[in-house]
Amino acid sequence: MFASLLEAAKNSPLRTPFTKVQCDTPAKGSGPVVGRQIQAAATPDNGDSCEFGSTKYFALCSIGGVLSCGTTHTFVVPLDLVKCRLQVDQAKYKNLFHGFKVTVAEEGMRGLAKGWAPTLYGYSAQGLCKFGFYEVFKVYYANLLGEENAYLYRTWLYLAASASAEFFADIALAPFEAAKVKIQTSPGFASTMRAAMPKIMKEEGIAGFYKGLVPLWMRQIPYTMMKFACFEKTVELLYKHVVPKPRSECSKGEQLVVTFAAGYIAGVFCAIVSHPADVVVSKLNQAKGSTALQVAKSLGFMGMWNGLTPRIIMIGTLTALQWFIYDGVKVALALPRPPPPEMPASLKAKLEAKAQ
C-alpha cells in the first residue's frame, strides 16, 4: 500500500499546496515543461535538500515527528503525572498545585519524573508515525481529489489525513502508554519501564498492552484531527489577516513565530475535544479488569472533565512546541515547505466566468 502512496506522490501532475516539487530534465535547448509549476520553498538561498513527496522527504518528516513528540512529551512528564493522578484520584489530589505538593511530599522531586522512559519511547514512536504518515496521506488524498477539490475541501483533507496517520501512531504508542499510566497511578506496581512491561506481560499477557487501544484511538484521533486541521487553517488565517506581509517575504524566524502561535491555538482546542477519552484511558489502565464503558459510567459526565485545566496548559504548550520543533527541523534540513493554499487558476477562471 505504501509503495502506491509514494508512487502517487511522485507522479502527481496536480499543482496544489501538496504537489511535489519536481523538475523534469528537458532536452537540450528546450524550455520549461509546459504546465508544470515549481513551488517556492522557504529556503531559496540554499535550495531544497529533497523533492516534495519523495521517499527521503517523508523519512525526514518522520525524524521531525520523533524529535517534536518525543522531546516535548518527556519535557512535561511532571505535569502529565499530576494530571493523570487528578483524573484517577480526585479525593487525594484536589487540584494541580495540591497534586504537585502531595507528590513531592511523598516521593520527593524524583517522583515527578516517574514514567519518563515509556513517555520518551512511546511518543517518539507515535511522532514518527503521526507526522510521517500525515505527510504521506495528505499527498495521497490530494491526488485522489484533484487540484480543485483538494483546495475546496482542504479542511476535510487535513482531517482525513491526520485521522489515518493517528490510527497507526496509536498502535505504536499503546504498549508504552499502558506502562506509563501504571507507573504513574498504581502505587507499588513498578517505578521503571524495565520493571513495568514484564510485569504487565506476566499478569495480563499481550492484551494488557493494548486494552487501552480503543479509548486511545477515541482520545488521540479526534485530538490529532483537531491538531492538524486547526493548525493548518490557523496558519492560513494568520498569514491572511494578521501577518502584514506574505509568508514568502517573512524571515524563517518570523515564520516559526507564526507556527508557534498557530500551534498553541490548535492545542487548546485539542485538549478540550480529547479530554473525556483521556480521563477514561488513565482510569482504565489503573483499574485492572475494567472496560472503557464501565469506567465511563463510573466516572459520570462531570468526572470525565477532571484535570482539564492542567491538560489545557500541557497540551497547548505541547502542541505549540511540537509544531515549532517540527517546522524548525524542516527549516534545518532544508525540506520543501509549500506556502498556505491558494485557489488554483482553473478554479478562479470558472468562478469569474460564472460571475459574468
Image: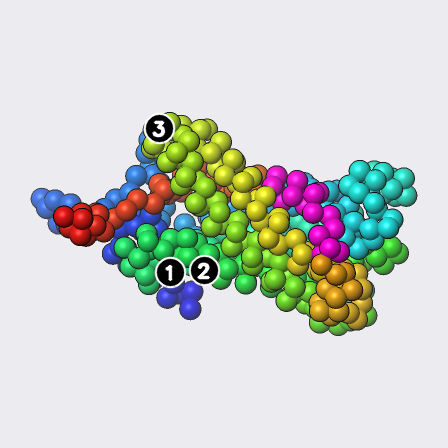
For the question of whether residue 54 can be seen, the reply is no
Tell me which residue sits at (49%, 62%) in the image: 164
Question: Does the segment drawn in magenta span residue 308?
Answer: yes
The N terminus sits in image quarter: bottom left
- The answer to whether the residues at label 2 and label 3 have Cβ atoms under 8 Å apart is no
Q: In which quarter of the image is residue 75?
A: top right
What is the magenta range?
Answer: 302-318
Distance from Cα at disc 1 to Cα at disc 3: 30 Å
Nearer-the-camera pick, 299 or 218: 299
Q: Which badge, 2 or 3, is on the more N-terminal residue?
A: 2
Percent coordinates x, y for residue 265 in the rendering: 54, 40
Q: List the single residue furthest toward the left.
A: 29
Q: Which of marks 2 and 1 is in front?
A: 2
| Residue placed under numbered mark 3 in the picture | 245
Percent coordinates x, y for residue 87 in the rendering: 76, 53
Q: In this view, does 149 lie above or below 72?
A: below
Nearer-the-camera pick, 258 or 89: 89
Give neighbour class at mark 2: few <14, some 14-19, many 20+ (Cα, 10 Å).
Answer: some
Q: Is residue 308 left or right of residue 112?
A: left
Q: Which of marks 1 and 3 is in front?
A: 3
Distance from Cα at disc 2 to Cα at disc 3: 31 Å
Q: Which badge, 2 or 1, is on the more N-terminal residue?
A: 1
Q: List the single residue furthest toward the front.
A: 356
Tag 1 secondary structure: helix
Tell me which residue sits at (79%, 55%) in the image: 88
Give neighbour class at mark 3: few <14, some 14-19, many 20+ (Cα, 10 Å).
Answer: few
